[in-house]
Each structure stands twice: as structure tokens, then as C-alpha cells.
Image (tube, helix red, strand yellow):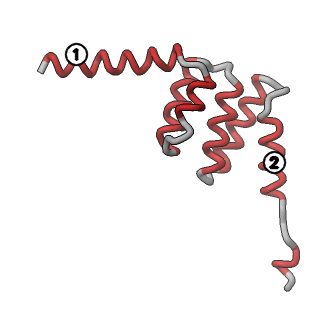
């Protein structure tokens, strides 16, 4: 039983060290085939280790947007913009606002 506990402990340490060493580009590449939950969990852990990384916040926001979690996405975009006003989150936020503001009047008045 002690061997199993040690194995779990070292596995967790190895995982956390890989997040510290892993660059954002490597993380994004590894998340291409990951599920929404796996992606958001990994990005959240990465952000906790790199709180000033606006690109990571933008990437997590895009994952939220793709899953239909609009308010979480917008919160991440705003946090990224607060860190870096020139962030690509500006474009994502503008696109999100345009989508949410869009209204086809013909659908209301056929």
C-alpha cells in the first residue's frame, strides 16, 4: 500500500512540475484533442502558476465560449485585458459583444 501512495504522490508531483515547466504553446497544443473539462482544468492550473499570463486567460475564455459558457468567457477576456490592454482578448471580447448584440429584426416581425 505504501508503494501505491508513493507512486500517486510522485505522479502528482511530476504532473505539477510539468505544468510549471510547460510553456503556454505546449499546453495549447496538448489541449487540442482534450475535452472541455480537461482543457479548463489544465488551463486553470496553469493560470494559478502564471497569474499574469493574459494569453492563458484568453485561451481559457475561448474554451468557455466554445462550450456555451458566455459569462465565464467574458470574465476571462476582461481579466486578460486588465493584465494587458493590448491583449488578443480585446478582439475576442469585441467579437463576443457583436454576437451577443446581434438581433435579426425580421425574426421578430415576419
User: Is 21 situated left or right of 70 in this image?
Assistant: left
Q: Give me the residue at 84% from left, 61% from top.
A: 102
In the rendered view, tell whether residue 21 sits above or below residue 47.
above
Image quarter (top left, top right, bottom left or bottom right) of the N terminus: top left
Instruction: Specify the quadrant of the image occupied by residue 44.
Output: top right
Q: Give me the residue at 52% from left, 37% from top.
A: 39
104 vs 35, nearest the viewer: 35
- x then y, percent, for residue 93: 79, 42
Q: How many marks?
A: 2
Instruction: Specify the quadrant of the image occupied by residue 50.
Output: top right
Residue wearing tag 2: 95
Image quarter (top left, top right, bottom left or bottom right) of the C terminus: bottom right
User: Is 86 situated left or right of 27 in this image?
Assistant: right
**Residue neighbourhood size for the residue with mark 1, other residues' Cα within 10 Å, grouped as few (<14), some (14–19), many (≥20):** few
Q: Earlier in the sequence, mark 1 or mark 2?
A: 1
Check disc 2 and report its element: helix, strand or loop. helix
User: Is 24 situated left or right of 85 in this image?
Assistant: left
Q: Give me the residue at 79% from left, 56% from top.
A: 99
**Residue neighbourhood size for the residue with mark 2, other residues' Cα within 10 Å, grouped as few (<14), some (14–19), many (≥20):** few
Check disc 1 and report its element: helix, strand or loop. helix
In the rendered view, tell whether residue 102 sits above or below residue 71.
below
13 vs 71, nearest the viewer: 13
- x then y, percent, for residue 69: 62, 50
User: Mark 1 near mark 2, Cβ–Cβ under 8 Å?
Assistant: no
- x then y, percent, for residue 25: 63, 25
Residue wearing tag 1: 6
Q: Give me the residue at 61% from left, 45% from top.
A: 64
Mark 1–mark 2 Cα distance, whole angstroms, equals 48 Å
Amino acid at each position: 500500500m505504501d508503494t501505491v501512495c508513493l507512486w500517486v504522490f510522485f505522479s502528482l508531483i511530476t504532473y505539477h512540475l510539468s505544468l510549471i515547466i510547460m510553456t503556454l504553446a505546449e499546453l495549447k497544443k496538448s489541449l487540442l484533442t482534450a475535452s472541455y473539462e480537461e482543457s479548463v482544468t489544465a488551463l486553470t492550473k496553469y493560470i494559478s502558476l502564471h497569474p499574469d499570463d493574459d494569453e492563458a486567460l484568453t485561451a481559457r475564455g475561448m474554451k468557455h465560449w466554445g462550450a456555451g459558457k458566455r459569462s465565464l468567457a467574458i470574465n476571462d477576456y476582461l481579466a486578460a485585458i486588465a493584465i494587458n490592454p493590448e491583449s488578443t482578448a480585446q478582439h475576442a471580447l469585441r467579437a463576443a459583444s457583436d454576437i451577443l448584440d446581434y438581433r435579426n429584426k425580421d425574426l421578430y416581425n415576419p
